[in-house]
Image (cartoon, rainbow, N blue to C red):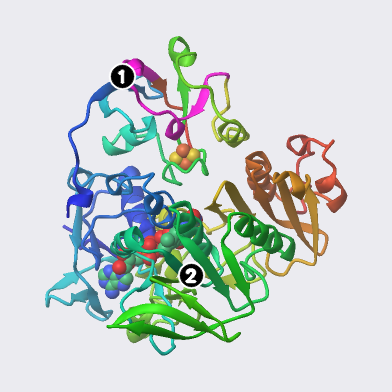
């Protein structure tokens, strides 16, 4: 069943920091989203009910300020989906399913909110 | 060691029940039994991003396979449960073995309704529920020119949108005089007819397929009740689903339009629960009992049942929500609109960014938002808290819905 097969891909490190301050470094395949990197490696704190369709806002993260302007600006849809998030929205709030991992983002730090639901 | 919690069904609901049990620290064994050979995956992308090639198969799984080992979830994939022996508290599998349970969770979902017409058995007549179905349709679409979609509901229209985006010539046939008739207001049905027509999808309303004609065992054309013949290399059927309740019924549990459960998702047997697409439950957002087919319902009922099993039962009262993506239009729904007696719109439908607010006896019961995610997100809060919103307020765009006064205690 080759359609499920995994091709070897380049990766970039993403650092997920829990609300308690514990950091986990994950090598996320380039092209995957920050959300997918977390789900595939069992990082708790990203729920992703809609599976990355930008429909649930349960993949909310706070992006480290130093990386903020290196990300592609968010689209209007993501911006609106961040209305009424369960944990408070801040200027560095993003939906992690909308951030694609690239080589340039290696070392990206995202902080997870207290709760997603 | 105590007998395990046994979950039948490895879909979104079954997965969530198992994952939530572990997330909350539940320590006894957990067994999942699933007829499909795969570990749990998501269905929504199957008609959308997976079908168009935007999302790989490896990215549809809810968790990697290691998750189940790491969380001591015993996943029996490719095993079908064939009988529940309530007296002895065990489940018999098609392979012959028995699995004892302490608590049983039925998360058996639903299966597609099949087309009861001549020619429906021809090669090229397809249904979409599982990833294997999706792979089959996707492969067939590669060589197809003409696609006829039977059914103008969510799945049919999503398939139409995906097939059209892949450059196919697409016709949608819907028996009702309007699209998504069971789910949305006529105004939205008409909006969607225009969206699809604008993309050169032919929409045929008020017609039914009468016969599928083939050549050498392969579907070639569909004859409709209006007398026309439509060429078809692929006939994709999306005419709804039937809840999988036979296991429960044969074990003497009450079933109606699904496995009947109470507000705690419990069947008449205190050791057996039912959740997700298969469960007919009392819902505070409906005027009575309903069976919902949505990720939200599967996930939230999975969470509720896990809490109940751990001894922290609470009434299932989550706000229903749902979405569909077709072409560049996203519809997000919150609440349940059936039984509404009044609708108002917020925003201009011409702009393709607007919401429809549904009221019953003066009370807000649902909001459907077209390309207006903020209305949807605010709507989830409004409905959860029971804020009193009048139709006039809903249509007044100068009013910030986020700043409405809190609900009165009587609501
Ligand atoms: C193509 C498609 C697109 C969708 N899009 C959306 C969307 O955009 N948004 C949304 O909210 N919802 C969507 N849905 C609906 C959503 O996927 C379902 O509501 C959800 O999957 C229900 O989960 P469930 O676990 O209750 O049932 P299911 O996902 O049906 O899982 C039930 C599982 O139980 C197994 N099973 C049944 N009987 C037995 C048995 N006797 N023994 C062992 N195993 C058994 C079945 O094989 C199946 O794997 C979509 C569904 C489909 C098919
Ligand atoms: S996973 Fe649902 S919005 Fe990101």
**Looking at the image, which residue is at 32% across and 53% down?**
B41
Above/below status of A14 relative to B169: above
**Looking at the image, which residue is at 74% across and 43% down?**
B351
Contact (Cβ within 8 Å) of mark 1 with mark 2: no
Is residue B260 one of those drawn in magenta? no
Residue B51 visible in the shown view: yes
Question: What chain letter is assigned to the residue under label 1?
Answer: A
Q: Which residues are magenta?
A: A91-109
Above/below status of B245 relative to B33: below
- Where does the image place residue B261, in percent across and percent down from the top left? 47, 72
Number of marks in the rendered image: 2
Above/below status of B318 relative to B378: below
Local secondary structure at mark 2: strand
Residue A26, located in which quarter of the rendered image?
Answer: top left
Q: Is residue B393 left or right of residue B48?
A: right
Q: Is residue B234 left or right of residue A79?
A: left
Per the image, the residue denoted by label 1 is A103
- Where does the image place residue B187, in percent across and percent down from the top left? 74, 61
> Crowding at label 2, few (<14), some or many (≥20) Cα neighbours within 10 Å?
many
Q: Is residue B287 left or right of residue B53?
A: right
Per the image, the residue denoted by label 2 is B149
């Amino acid at each position: 069943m080759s359609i499920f097969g995994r091709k070897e891909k380049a990766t970039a490190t993403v650092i997920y920091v829990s609300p308690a301050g514990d950091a986990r470094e994950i090598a996320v395949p380039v092209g995957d989203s920050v959300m997918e990197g977390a789900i595939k490696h069992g990082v708790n704190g990203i729920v992703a009910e809609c599976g990355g369709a930008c429909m649930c806002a349960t993949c909310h993260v706070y992006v480290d300020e130093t990386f903020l302007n290196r990300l592609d600006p968010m689209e209007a849809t993501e911006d609106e989906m961040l209305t009424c998030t369960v944990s408070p929205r801040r200027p560095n709030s993003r939906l992690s399913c909308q951030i694609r991992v690239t080589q340039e983002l290696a070392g990206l730090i995202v902080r997870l909110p207290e709760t997603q639901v | 060691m105590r007998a395990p919690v046994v979950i039948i069904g490895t879909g979104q609901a079954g997965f969530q029940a198992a994952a939530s049990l572990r997330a909350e620290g539940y320590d006894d064994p957990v067994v999942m039994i699933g007829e499909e050979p795969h570990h749990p995956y998501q269905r929504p992308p199957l008609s959308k991003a997976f079908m168009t090639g935007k999302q790989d198969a490896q990215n549809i799984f809810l968790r990697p396979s290691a998750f189940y080992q790491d969380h001591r979830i015993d996943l029996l994939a490719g095993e079908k449960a064939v009988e529940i022996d309530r007296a002895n508290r065990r489940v018999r599998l098609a392979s012959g073995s028995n699995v004892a349970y302490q608590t049983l969770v039925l998360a058996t979902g639903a299966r597609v309704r099949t087309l009861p017409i001549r020619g429906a058995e021809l090669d090229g007549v397809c249904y979409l529920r599982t990833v294997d179905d999706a792979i089959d349709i996707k492969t067939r679409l590669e060589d197809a020119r003409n696609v006829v979609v039977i059914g103008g509901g969510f799945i049919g229209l999503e398939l139409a949108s995906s097939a059209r985006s892949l450059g196919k010539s697409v016709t949608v046939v819907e028996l009702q005089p309007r699209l998504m008739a069971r789910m949305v207001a006529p105004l939205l049905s008409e909006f969607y007819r225009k969206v699809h027509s604008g993309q050169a999808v032919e929409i045929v309303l008020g017609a039914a397929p009468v016969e599928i004609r083939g050549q050498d065992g392969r579907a070639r054309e569909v004859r409709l009740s209006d007398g026309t013949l439509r060429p078809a290399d692929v006939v994709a059927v999306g005419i709804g689903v039937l809840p999988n309740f036979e296991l429960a019924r044969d074990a003497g549990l009450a079933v109606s339009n699904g496995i009947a459960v109470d507000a705690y998702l419990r069947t008449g047997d205190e050791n057996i629960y039912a959740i997700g697409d298969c469960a007919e439950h009392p819902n505070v957002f409906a005027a009575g009992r309903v069976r919902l087919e949505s990720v939200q319902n599967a996930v939230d009922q999975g969470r509720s049942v896990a809490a109940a099993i751990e001894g922290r039962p609470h009434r299932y009262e989550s706000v229903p929500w749902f979405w569909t993506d077709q072409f560049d239009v996203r519809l997000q729904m919150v609440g349940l609109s059936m039984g509404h007696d009044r609708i108002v719109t917020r925003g201009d439908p011409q702009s393709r960014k607007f919401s429809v607010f549904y009221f019953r006896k003066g009370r807000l019961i649902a909001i459907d938002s077209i390309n207006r995610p903020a209305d949807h997100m605010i709507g989830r809060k409004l409905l959860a808290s029971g804020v009193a919103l009048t139709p006039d307020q809903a249509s007044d765009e100068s009013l910030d819905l986020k700043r409405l006064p809190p609900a009165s205690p009587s609501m």
